[in-house]
Image: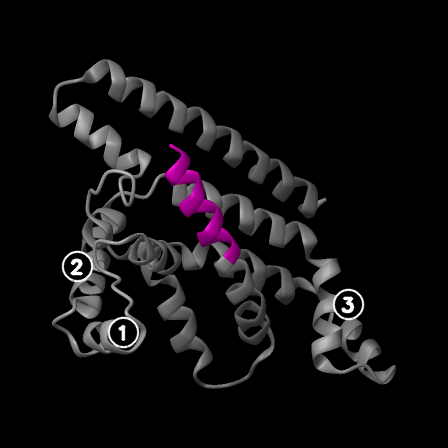
Amino acid sequence: MLLTFKVAFLTTFILLLLAIPLGYFLAFTRSRIAPILEAVVSMPLVLPPSVLGFYLLITFSPQSPLGKFLLDVFNLKLVFSFEGLIVGSVIFSLPFMVNPIQAGFSALPQSLFEAALTLGKSRLRILYSVLLPNISRSVLVGVVVTFAHTIGEFGVVMMIGGNIQGQTRVASIAIYDEVESLNYTLAHQYALSLFAITFSILLLAFYLNKRSVK
């Protein structure tokens, strides 16, 4: 269970760093590549986890050009490793962080941005000192939903991370193992714990989202 929370925490932290500039760009850009980026970001919402996991497995395999490069240059193996688990989780949970933040930026009045520009602030300073404080609830919703989603991941993490005790065996995979072993009592304990934790996190997310609407 501790490994599951470690993966969820790191995934959420990395995605927060990525989603703020990406959500800002998608909300305010007029670039023609924006729809393409939005489609790429949203793909994990509709793509079967096993499909995404399979292509990640092929992409980062030591036999692939990218996998071989990472292994030879950085001594980094992403297949059946904790690092690969994080990469897969980040990609699979991307829309759950980016979409709320993008929506938060899009809901801000244009006058707020223009007023900050007239004060001589740089765009970077406007982002972090003016815009972000005004979408704090959207950011918080993204963090909470991403964390909850990562806790329950199975298909992607199973494909790219495998089932290695102490390294890649997260709670969802542990439940699968216990069911396969007909150990329903332990599987029930794991499942009930995940259910209670995830429900509590989602309850918090919906509560915060309702408050932000008001």
Quarter of the image holding residue 102? bottom right
Up the image or down, 200 lies above or below 73; here it is above
Amino acid identity at mark 2? Phe
Q: Chief secondary structure of the magenta span?
A: helix
Q: Which residue is mark 1?
A: 70
Relative to 167, 36 lies left or right: right
* Dots 1, 2 in contact, CB < 8 A: no
Local crowd at mark 2 within 10 Å, few (<14), some, or many (≥20)? some
Residue at 49 percent across and 52 percent down: it is: 12
Amino acid identity at mark 1? Leu
Amino acid identity at mark 3? Ser
Element type at mark 1:
helix
Relative to 161, 32 lies left or right: right
Local crowd at mark 1 within 10 Å, few (<14), some, or many (≥20)? some
User: Tag on residue 129?
Assistant: 3
Give, as a single range, the part of the protein colored magenta.
1-13
User: In the depicted view, which residue is nearer to us: 4 or 38?
Assistant: 4
